[in-house]
Amino acid sequence: MTWFLIALLSSFLSAFAAITQKKVLFNRSPLEFSYLLSIVNLLFSIPFFLFIDYGTINSFNLTILFIKSLIGVGAFLCVMTALKNLQISNALPLLALTPGFVAVFAFIFLGEALKLEEVIGLISLIAGTYILESKNLKEILFPLNVFFKSKYHQYILMALLLFTASSVMDKILLIKLNLTPVSLTAFQHLFFAFFFAIIFFGVRGTKEKGLSIINKKDLGWIALISVLTIGYRFTQVIAISLASVALTLAVKRTSVLWATIIGGKIFKDSNMLKKIIAVLFILLGAILILRD
């Protein structure tokens, strides 16, 4: 049960991080926000480097982590772009499909099989997401069409695929390549800052006009988001090291329930009753997955 409590803590931290991210994204572009957050994350991650077992570090696992971090940067930027342009109660629940994707890829690459109850749970996760995106029962195909017609939903779909690859690579790094959760967290934030700096300053002369004015209030929000972000990433990594990737991600994605209810209320999202019902299906899926 230790892994479950840690994964649940990760879900709470992730939900509140998403709510605060949405607030900051009202005034900043996704790329600018991601760059600023990556720098603050790196600063707050410095203490992790003091507790690394450098005997477990080698060029091979760092290279894999480097590639994994690049994938994570792409996923995070996709989510921030969707979060800025969609209602929080529409964008985040779609990420609950991640355990389904992870289960398939983990089975193929890591040999992790799922029980019948867990498969039913993953189906419930998908059903909840389907309800979330449907306009009404008559328009059965709408949840499928939305991914083809809405570019911001396509960002979520891309993030879904990238998060799947990233999560499987987490398991490989922790179990197969003997990287510790502390080492993974520290170097991942170093690589994140590196990649976001290259991307931000690389497009600065074309699409970006440089950094906007940063006041104390903005800095305070970004610092809070940084603490929440490091917290949910670190606890997720620990949980993955203790349990299967799919089960950990299933619990982690219950964050959509908290973010939908709290964030939807704060930002006055529409159709909240339908969305809460949909997310309850997602939560039911997580409960079924946790049945032993």
Image (spheres, grey):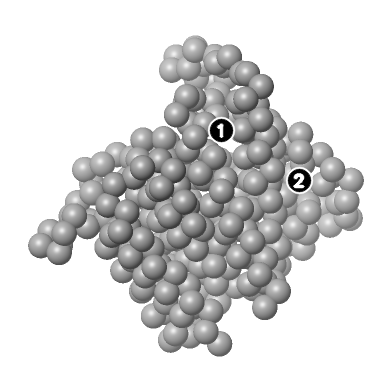
Q: Which residue is mark 1?
A: 34
Task: State the SS at label 2.
Answer: helix
Q: Position of residue 155 (x, y in %)?
A: 38, 43
Q: Depth check: 226 or 234 in front? A: 226
Q: Secondary structure at mark 1?
A: helix
- The vertical placement of 16 against 283, above or below, is above
Mark number for residue 137? none
Q: Is residue 78 shown to the viewer in this render? A: no
Question: Residue 273 appears at what percent x and percent y?
Answer: 30, 59
Q: Give the residue displayed 28% in from the left and 59% down from the top.
A: 274
Kindly identify the residue that appears in the image at 48 percent across and 85 percent down. Answer: 115
Tell me the amino acid under the disc marked 2. Ala
In the rendered structure, the answer to whether residue 287 lies left or right of residue 13 reads left
> Mark number for residue 186?
2
Measured as percent of width and height from the top left, residue 215 is found at: 63, 18
> What quarter of the picture does the N terminus occupy?
bottom right
Q: CA distance from mark 2 to mark 1?
A: 17 Å
Q: Does 100 sit left or right of 138 as displayed?
A: right
- Left or right of 89, for residue 46: right
Residue 3, by quadrant, is bottom right
Quarter of the figure with residue 269: top left
> Nearer the viewer's eye, disc 2 or disc 1?
1
N-terminal of the two: label 2 or label 1? 1
Badge 2 crowding class, 10 Å Cα cut-off, few under 14, some 14 to 19, many 20 or more, is: many
Picture residue at 60% right of the left edge, 49% below the top: 68
When the figure is inspected, residue 18 is found, relative to residue 279, above or below; the finding is above
For the view shown, which residue lies furthest in the left direction?
A: 138
State whether residue 225 is above or below residue 25.
below
| Residue type, mark 1 in image | Ser
Q: Position of residue 143 (x, y in %)?
A: 23, 56
